[in-house]
Image (spheres, rainbow, N blue to C red):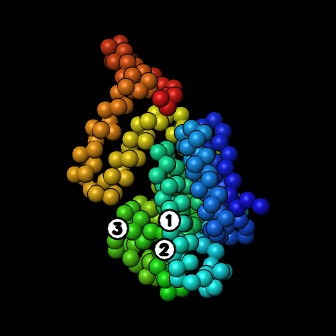
Amino acid sequence: MPHLTLTVTDGIADVVLNNPPQNRIDRQMADELAAATEDITRRNARAVLLRAGGPDFCFGGDIVDWPDLSTAELRALFEHYMDVFNAFERLPIPVIAAVQGRCSGGGFELALRADVIIAAESAHFGHPEQTLGIVTLLGGIYRVAERAGRARAFEWALTSEQIPARTMADVGVVNRVVADDTLLQEATDLARKLADGPTRAHAAHKALLQVWAANGTTAADQVMFDLAMPLFETQDAKAGLASAVTAYKAGRPRPALEFHGR
């Protein structure tokens, strides 16, 4: 039985974790996420909605077999997970995560690969690894630090406390908090809005942030025009600029455009 499903409809790739009761991440789910990531690219999706079935997003990794594995086997497993998560993170389209209930360990680290996190009021986030005597294996601590700062990231990793969605929104880890019964609709609406937008420009903005995160502002400045100038050759930018000039000359507001992602 699949632990993850993918459907692509009208440019939105809907990725659903479905490994009840806790949606724990195992090799099967990681392999299915890797296949889904490749499929999303092949099918020309323009936005991704990452979500989970059931009351909780994900409790983290499926640790049942870990005590029976050698250190080398564990390393190979975790490196595989890291490669899969990072490939998902590098998708050149916006990724929105809709999170409800508990979001812990590897599940939290997967949500952090999204560009936008929309959390239900029921959502709580945490790093349980410290309670096991290990670390955030898939980059959780420094991805939280990138969003919320070193001090908070270190404290939460040290304490393994469950942090409510409102607190995560206050410090910038989560983009917005919504009622549980509107979570899916609000996340879907945002995915629809982004999928209808200028796909190539979205990809360039995402690439610029990735360069900045890795190497800082100076590095991002150095690649800015390599990423920006090709946009002026796209159908979307040409239509957008022409529309803006026409509206300006006529003294009227610019109309909303239908972008085609090319």
- Check disc 2 and report the residue beneath it: 137
Contact (Cβ within 8 Å) of mark 1 with mark 2:
yes
Q: Quadrant of the N terminus?
A: bottom right
Pick whichever, 185 or 3, lies toward us. 3
- Residue 157 visible at all: yes
Question: Does 34 appear above or below 59?
Answer: above
Mark toward the viewer: 1 or 3: 1
Give the x, y percent position of residue 77.
Answer: 56, 72
Q: In 3D space, how far apart are the residues under numbered discs 1 and 2 (Cα atoms)?
A: 8 Å
**Sequence-wise, which precedes: disc 1 or disc 2?**
1
Q: In 3D space, how far apart are the residues under numbered discs 3 and 2 (Cα atoms)?
A: 19 Å
Left/right placement of residue 35 relative to residue 217 reads right
- Check disc 3 and report the residue beneath it: 149
- Check disc 1 and report the residue beneath it: 82
Left/right placement of residue 80 relative to residue 150 reads right
Contact (Cβ within 8 Å) of mark 3 with mark 2:
no
The residue at 57%/84% (across/down) is 70
Q: What element carries label 3?
A: loop
**Sequence-wise, which precedes: disc 3 or disc 2?**
2
Identity of the amino acid at label 1?
Answer: Met
Contact (Cβ within 8 Å) of mark 1 with mark 3:
no
Mark toward the viewer: 1 or 2: 1
